[in-house]
Image: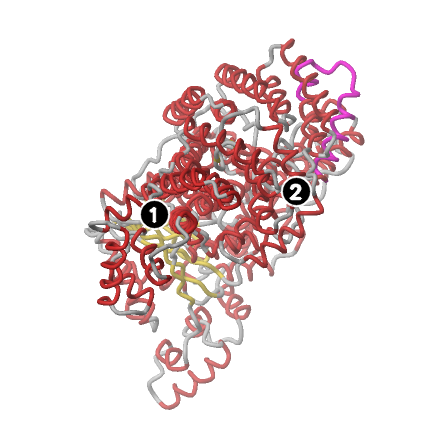
Amino acid sequence: MAGDFVGRAVELAFLARRIEDAAHSTGSVVLLAGPAGIGKSTLAAEALRRHAEPSRLTAVQGHCPRDEVAPPLWPWQRALQHAGVDPGLSLGQSGRAPAAPAHAADAADARFRELARMSEALTAAAAEHPLLILLEDLHWADTASLDLLRQVARQRNDRGLLVLGTVREPVPEEAAGALTDLRRYGAATLRLTPFSKAEVAQCLNAETPGAAKAAEESYRRTGGLPLLVATLRVHASEDLGTVVSGLLTGLTAEQREVVRAAAVLGERLEPGLLAAVLPELDESVVAEALTAAWHAGVLTTAETTADTGRAYGFAHDLVRDEVLGRTTPAATRTLHRAAARALELEQAAAADPAEAARIAAHWRRAGREPAFRAAAARWSRTAAELARKRHAYDDAARHLAHAAAVLGSADPDRAAVLVELARAEYLCGRYAACLRYCEEAATAVCEGGRPELLADVALVLQGVSFPKASEAISRLCRAALAIEDLPGAVQARLLAQLAAASADLGALDAAAEHARAALALAGSTGDPRAELDAARAVEMTLAFPDGTPERLRLGELTVARAERLGAPLSAVMGHTWRVQSGYLLGRLDLVDQAVRGIEEIADRSGLPLARWHLLRVSAARAVLEGRFETARRHNEDAAGLALTSGDEIAIAMNHVLRLQLALVRGDPAELTADIWDVLDRASQLPLPLYLSVRGRALFLAGRLDEAREAYGQLRPMLPLSTVNPSWPGVLLHMVDLIALVGDVEGAQVVYDQLSTLRPYPGALGTPTAYFSGTVSRHLGRLAAVAGRPVEAEELLREALRRNRVLGARPDVALTCLDLAAVRRARGERGGDRSALAEAATLAGEALVIARQLGQPGPAAAAVRQLGEIAALRDETDPLTRREREIAEFVIQAQTNREIAADLSISERTVETHVRRILRKRGCANRTELVARWAAGED
């Protein structure tokens, strides 16, 4: 009865507000959390009964079954079905199984699209009519369902989609992380507490003094747990076990047997299925037993439809657990066997593997006989395949782990299962687990006598660089290559894999040899997948600038082969190599062609990862050209895609570009707290790239003592190893630090290494990170530190020409400042007034560009340089120190009020100084003063 609901006034009011918000097109996610029996489902049902009028919003429900027995996204699919929404067929439902993704990036992209499809269906439904979805028992949800919930939570919800979820605490470790993340995206959590003494009394209708004492005793016995309190209202017993005994007492032995079978079967309590589990009983007898259990309070009605009649569920999972605990292990195993066989027959008739995970779970609990274990493994693999089709790779890995666990070491199928499990872990991005299963699979291959699988094992872990993995991959590839009669395409892929591992281990010569052998062999076989793998391996070995023409050729080959294979992400990779090569060669036409290629793929395929690459290369280009706001917008959009995919490396690229923005603009405000968190964590790893990036950030932030310490860690690493292709980037980050400490010897070492890039006139960098101007500028700065001013001037002039051609205006401003400093120093040493005049012109140009683009650091440096140059050109400067100070503020376009605030003087005093400055310099107004100053006339 509605009047039986007790307490929860605050929680009900909160839910009422959220439901009202949803009815007015503002959605949200709310979790109802607490221990079993605390009343989460009861509260949700009461909130829906009171406030979710069908005319205002559609309320539907999905349930997460325990024991991981439902297909991926099951609760969401059920909820959408109840709402009359068809999310459309995914690749995994189209009748033809999609090809297994070749790389983790492809898997992440496919998974993103699956979740995006469901998310779009939800928001579209909510846009038509506000939608409330109740997801019960999220602590048992599959990984894909939790990922979709996170995506819904993080999206700006202005379409009236309210998701309520019930969560039993403590939460299992598998779901805890995902549910915790929801709070970061704005989800609210209502944590329910036990009833108070007054609420227990109200629940028991304790109005008389004697009844109040009974309520006090009930509170002591139940601790205020609503489930026990409600049960004691009818059954005055000591504990739930006694209550359940009382509930079962009224049933016949035959009916109790049906209840035990129902507890084993779990979620679906249909008479027909239960009769198949208990073939000695007629279906009508089973139906009568279910009705009797319902009347006894053991079961409750889940739903009633015209097609299936009444469907039942246990009154609470604690009741089901109590029934299971009263069933002997032998009887439980017998019932699990019967349930597995009944479900198998049902699935065979329907030709639908949706119950595969449930069948596997029953076979796992049926006993340890080899036939039962084999059946459990077979159905777990079927469930994994269904999950893979839905791009739910976490769930596929879980099912395959179940399959591997039930197969003995001598079972010939175990090696194949372990290979599948390793591949699923790889597609999840869990590379350490993948490696562990690869090594287990290699052992199983030997024990099971299936050497043909060794090549599959060696090829699982693709594109992953860490020493332990590379050592294992190298060992596995060599063992696989020793097998006779391997197909040429497989040999080529193994050689490519061996090349990548060798490069990561520092054996560049061996890596190059393996990679080129792979490319030649792949070309002779005509296998496009082998050619793509070989091209990627060769590109990895191109750590030196003279490999640029080869990288360009490989990019074109990869694009062509990827088009033939229908692999758009591989084509995107080929285009990014073309972008990188085109920029270094100064061939902007090649860059334009490659970017258009990425854009066409992104538009044609709709792949999020293709869009991410397009946004990244567009952001990098915008920074290079000085379109900073555009760069930020592209970077933020790319970061949003990366967050959705969960790719940590992709997420980090957001910080990399913001750091480049800070460096180019000379504005440490770009370095937000989250960037420093990443940099400080990275500093614990003694890797040159991390140390150099952090050191340069410290320099920019004005933390000069810490920047010197960072350089102190880097200095012993010089000359830098060139095994890793990131070595030019590390050295470029060190230039500011070398200039800071004035390390003449270090400047020469870095100069010698970077000078190999001088023949290439273009921009340095990578499409997913950023591009900076020509290396000539950095060489010029290093030459200046090393005490070679003539060479520094030559290099900086070269840099100025090259950066102008590239359209790299921010680098033009920075180069002007560097060259102005060199020319000013020459004029100061030798009294060369023409050098001072040119220095003033260069600083003036830098000031104009910096102001146009929004580079506060270079703009301030230009003003300082102009002031210092003007003082050198006329040592009898008529301006006083205070007047010169104010003149520099005027040059920066500050108003009299702003100047007065900065100098803590009155505005009238500033006005007086400005009039004197204009008179002494012979200027009619501020504009003329700025123009003459920028032209070097002052």
Magenta span contains residue 482: yes
The crowding category of the residue bearing disc 1, from other C-alpha atoms within 10 Å (few below 14, some 14 to 19, many at least 20), is many
Which one is earlier in the sequence, the residue at label 1 or at label 2?
A: 2
Whether residue 370 is visible = yes
Residue 101 coordinates in the image, percent (x, y)? 54, 28
Q: How many marks?
A: 2
Residue 191 picture quarter:
bottom left
On the question of residue 150 being in view, the answer is no
- Residue at left offset 40%, top offset 23%: 592
Span highlighted in magenta in the image: 468-493
Residue 812 percent across, percent down from the top left: 42, 36
Predominant SS of the magenta segment = helix
- 118 relative to 140 in the view: left or right: left
The x and y percentages for residue 611 are 41, 32
Where residue 683 appears, as percent x and y from the top left, is: 61, 52
The one nearer the camera, 788 or 722, is 788
Residue pictured at 24% horizontal, 43% vertical:
127
User: Could you say which is closer to the camera, residue 530 or residue 749?
Assistant: 749
Q: Secondary structure at mark 1?
A: loop
Specify the amino acid type for callout 1.
Answer: Asp
Between the residue at mark 1 and the residue at mark 2, the CA separation in whole angstroms equals: 68 Å
Which residue is located at x 64 percent, y 22 percent?
A: 538
Disc 2 target residue:
433
Q: Nearer the viewer, residue 421 or 206?
A: 421
Quadrant for the N terminus, please. bottom left
To which residue does mark 1 refer?
Answer: 938
Left or right, residue 328 beside residue 85: right
Amino acid at pointer 2 = Ala
Quick check: marks 1 and 2 in contact, CB under 8 Å? no
